[in-house]
Image (cartoon, rainbow, N blue to C red):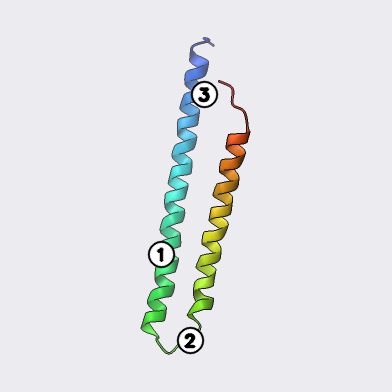
């Protein structure tokens, strides 16, 4: 294998990996907003329900978990040295 080919293969692999992560995050965001919208539309369609706080707590919990995971991943990536 040529020495110039190795960095290009690593670059290509990294680009493909980030494409996968971007696709995954877009799908997760669509799912999150769909669930939150479904909960809100159910609540507004049935105004006699008094416990909207509990219904929205699930989506708030999901948002907090996603925030913690993204912050942990960002902290892990910046703390890990990279060699090219």
Quote the CA–CA distance across marks 3 and 2.
55 Å
Q: Residue 82 falls in which quadrant of the image?
A: top right
Query: From the viewer's perspective, is residue 15 above or below residue 31?
Result: above
Task: Report crowding for label 2: few under 14, some 14 to 19, many 20 or more residues within 10 A (C-alpha).
Answer: few
**Which residue: 46% across, 33% down?**
16
Image location (x, y in percent) of residue 60: 52, 66
Q: Mark 1 points at which residue?
A: 34
Quote the CA–CA distance across marks 3 and 1.
36 Å
Q: Mark 2 points at which residue?
A: 50
Q: Please tell me the numbered disc located at residue 10.
A: 3
Image location (x, y in percent) of residue 62: 54, 62
Tag 3 near tag 2, CB within 8 Å = no
**Does dot 3 land on a helix, a strand or a loop?**
helix
Quote the CA–CA distance across marks 2 and 1.
22 Å
Q: Earlier in the sequence, mark 3 or mark 1?
A: 3
Task: Identify the image quadrant of the N terminus.
Answer: top right
Image location (x, y in percent) of residue 83: 59, 22
**Does dot 2 land on a helix, a strand or a loop?**
loop
Q: Which of marks 2 and 1 is nearer the N terminus?
A: 1
Q: In this view, does 26 lie to the left or right of 57?
A: left
Task: Report crowding for label 1: few under 14, some 14 to 19, many 20 or more residues within 10 A (C-alpha).
Answer: few
Front residue of this view, candidates 65 and 30: 65
Tag 2 near tag 1, CB within 8 Å = no
**Which residue: 62% across, 39% down?**
76
Q: Nearer the viewer, mark 2 or mark 1?
A: 2
């Amino acid at each position: 294998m040529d020495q110039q080919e190795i960095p290009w293969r690593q670059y290509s692999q990294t680009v493909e990996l980030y494409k996968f992560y971007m696709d995954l995050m877009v799908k997760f965001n669509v799912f999150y907003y769909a669930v939150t919208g479904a909960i809100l539309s159910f609540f507004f369609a049935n105004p006699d329900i008094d416990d909207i706080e509990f219904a929205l707590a699930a989506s708030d919990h999901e948002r907090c978990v996603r925030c913690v995971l993204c912050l942990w991943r960002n902290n892990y990536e910046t703390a890990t040295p990279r060699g090219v």
